[in-house]
Amino acid sequence: MKKSVLALAAAALVLSQVAVADEALATKSGCMACHQLTLKVVGPAYKDVATKYAGDAAAEATLIEKVKAGGVGNWGQVPMPPKGGNPAVSDEDVATLVKWILSLAAPAEAAPAAPAK
């Protein structure tokens, strides 16, 4: 039991460090000028994007292409320029950011725990 708790704590620590690192990448890349985690600014909140695409198997590839190409009309009439207006953002960083954004979706209802024996 102690090993399970320690493993869960270690996993949570690693995931929180990844989330902070990718939020830092979003800030460094200029994304946070128009997007925030939970608040719509110019563009949608990242958690809203994650919720909209939760469970969509094609979401990652779709969003990577949308970020690379830019667009308008999915979240209102304010256009997002290609790569958010920062052509220096690498395709690898775009993929990292999209994976991070999609990870922000609220976890599905957890299945009830099996009774202890």
Image (cartoon, rainbow, N blue to C red):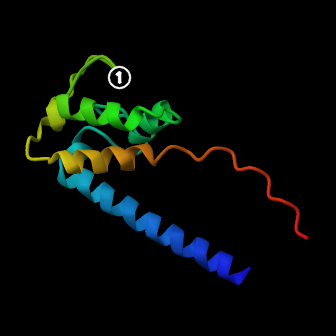
Residue type for callout 1: Trp
Asked whether, in this view, residue 74 is left or right of residue 16, the answer is left
- What residue do we see at 41% from left, 33% from top? 59
Q: Decide: few, some or many residues near mark 1? Use Cα within 10 Å; few <14, some 14-19, many ≥20.
A: few
- In the rendered image, residue 17, in percent from the top left (x then y), is placed at 39, 67
Q: Residue shown at 26%/29% (left/top)?
A: 66
Q: Using the rendered view, name the quadrant where residue 50 is placed.
A: top left
In the image, 94 versus 21, the foreground residue is 94
Residue at the extreme bottom? 2
Vertical placement of residue 43 versus 95, above or below:
above
Total labels: the figure holds: 1
Residue 72 higher or lower than 59, as above or below: above
Which is nearer the eye, 29 or 58? 58
Considering every residue shown, the one lying at the far left of the view is 88
Q: Quadrant of the C terminus?
A: bottom right
User: SS class of the residue under badge 1?
Assistant: loop
- Left or right position of 31 against 44: left
Task: Give x and y (percent) for residue 105.
Answer: 50, 43
| Placement of 28 over or under 83, stated as above or below | below
Quadrant of the image containing the N terminus: bottom right
Residue wearing tag 1: 75
Q: Quadrant of residue 23?
A: bottom left
Vertical position of residue 56 compared to residue 79: above or below? below
The residue drawn where x is 46% and y is 47% is 104
Q: Position of residue 30 (x, y in %)?
A: 18, 46
For the point 52% across and 67% down, which residue is it? 12
